Amino acid sequence: MTYVLSDDDIAVGDAVSVALEKMWGWYLAFGILSIIFGFFVISYRHASVYAIVYLASGFFIAVGVFEIFGSISVARQRWLHLVFGLIWIGAGVVGFVWPHITIFISAVIIGWAFLVLGIFDIIESVRHHHLPYWWLYLVRGLVAVAIGFLCIRHPGAPLTALVVLIGILAIVFGAVEIVGSFSARHATKNWDAYKAQLR
């Protein structure tokens, strides 16, 4: 059975594609910064509980800000992106305000945060499977879920291992955003081609 776009679907798609083209530079910039951050984290030599908490908190706040900015281009369920963004920022602020926590607690908090990020990416990739490079968000979600599971399952892992996991996720996150930014740059053309396939 062939799916037929309704007038509402077309109107929403037109609006979203225009918004994405306006914001593609933000996606590209955040992707580059995320990769740089990831390599910095991996090369960090003096791992400590404070380093773990501060690095993770910085990453959480950055993801939260990006999620809130990204919600501007979302026509439907914008509130969900805003809520996720606020949760990420809240988790980051808590880390900076309350850094005197043990490695076990920090590992569990980081693990659950990565699980939420991964599950959200997986759901979004399935919902938007008609978009180019949707599978990259699926891969990123699976990687985040795997890292989150490792952090929760082995909270006593060495500090350096947690630092490396945070760095890897930041690099994967950034790489996917860079690829997505180039897709967003041509969002209108891609959307028009998709509409043409269904006609």
Image: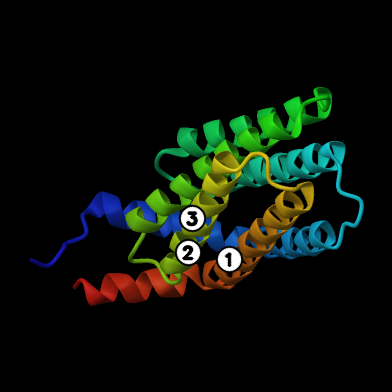
Query: Residue shown at 36%/51% (left/top)?
Result: 12
Q: Residue furthest right?
A: 46
Label 3: state its secondary structure: helix
Q: Are marks 2 and 3 in contact (CB under 8 Å)?
A: yes
- Could you say which is closer to the camera, residue 4 or residue 105? 105
Q: Is residue 71 visible?
A: no
Which of disc 1 and disc 2 is earlier in sequence?
A: 2
Select label 1 or label 3 by which is in front: 3
Q: Residue furthest left?
A: 1
Q: Are marks 1 and 3 in contact (CB under 8 Å)?
A: no
In which image quadrant can residue 114 be found? Answer: top right
Horizontal side of 80 relative to 159 (left or right) equals left
Select label 2 or label 1 by which is in front: 2
- Could you say which is closer to the camera, residue 175 or residue 72? 175
Query: Residue shown at 47%/52% (left/top)?
Result: 121
Residue 66 pos. (x, y %): 65, 47
Q: What kind of residue is marked 1?
A: Val
Q: Is residue 77 visible?
A: yes
C-alpha span from label 2 to label 1: 9 Å
Q: How many C-alpha atoms fall within 10 Å of the one at disc 2: few (<14), some, or many (≥20)?
A: some
Residue 190 pos. (x, y %): 42, 73
Q: Are marks 2 and 1 in contact (CB under 8 Å)?
A: yes
Label 2: state its secondary structure: helix
Q: How many C-alpha atoms fall within 10 Å of the one at disc 3: few (<14), some, or many (≥20)?
A: many
Residue to which mark 1 is pinned: 176
C-alpha span from label 1 to label 3: 11 Å
Horizontal side of 124 relative to 52 (left or right) equals left
- The numbered dot on residue 148 is none
- The numbered dot on residue 141 is 3
Q: What kind of residue is marked 3?
A: Gly
Residue to which mark 2 is pinned: 139
Q: What kind of residue is marked 2?
A: Val
